[in-house]
Image: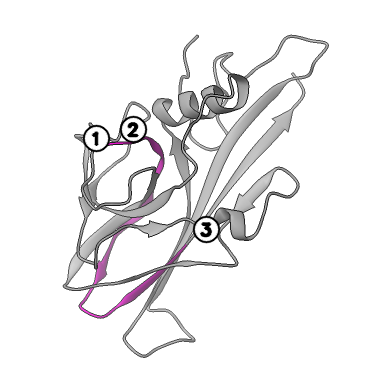
Amino acid sequence: MSIGNSKAGANFDGALRSNRPFGGAVLPVGRWTVACYSQGATEKPKWSETFDNLITTEGANELLYGCLFGAGGSTDWYIGLKSTGAAVVADTAASHASWTELTNYADPRVLWAGASSGVSAGSVSNSTSVASFTMTSSANIAGAFLQSASSQAATTGVLYAAGDFSAEKDVVTNDTLEVTATFTAVTSSG
């Protein structure tokens, strides 16, 4: 079975589709919101963008192994920031040649605290414990990703998801980025 294009809202090519009478498709989708605040500002961001992500094949495999086989799987997930380049479904933690990681913030990556808000109505988010990054130098940011390794530039673990802004954004020293990542298992009959 192939995963196909797993961008938010796209259909998996049978990978998560069950045969009747058990129902239709379960589509894991993600949505990110990133807001950039100038040093000392807490009310109005310099810029903000909400965007969908893709679930990588590596991430979909992790989901299936964990759910269907009870295989250990990753329990801690970390938010990282993308520099130039676009994510593709074939990206892995070990190989994502089309983009680079932005490392202009204090190591390590920020723990995604999805468990703090719990799972409800097929969705989980870190909205009650937003990930915060303080920039150590100026840079361009192109998006965000979720990976099971905490160290910046780590090529171990699983790259679950990655998403891209509509266009790269500028950040400067001491800007703070606040990142919310929400993942939903959308069900549909089919």
Instruction: Give the Cα separation between the discs numbered 2 and 1.
Output: 8 Å
Element carrying mark 3: loop
- Residue nearest the viewer, comparing 40 with 74: 74
Q: Which residue is mark 3?
A: 113
State the extent of the magenta-drawn residues as a range: 156-179
Q: Which residue is mark 1?
A: 96
User: Residue at left 49%, top 86%?
Assistant: 43
Which badge, 2 or 1, is on the more N-terminal residue?
A: 2
- Residue nearest the viewer, comparing 67 with 168: 67
Q: Main secondary structure of the magenta part?
A: strand
- Residue nearest the viewer, comparing 5 with 150: 150
User: Residue at left 80%, top 15%?
Assistant: 22
- Residue nearest the viewer, comparing 70 with 161: 70
Q: Which residue is mark 2?
A: 88
Mark 3 surroundings: few (<14), some (14-19) or many (≥20) residues within 10 A: many
| Mark 3 residue type | Ala
| Mark 1 residue type | His
| Quadrant of the snapshot with the C terminus | top right
Residue 161 percent coordinates (x, y): 42, 40
User: Residue at left 46%, top 43%?
Assistant: 53
Instruction: Give the Cα separation between the discs numbered 3 and 1.
Output: 24 Å
66 falls in the magenta region: no
Query: Does 56 sit above or below residue 22?
Result: below
158 falls in the magenta region: yes
Query: Does 85 sit above or below residue 62?
Result: below
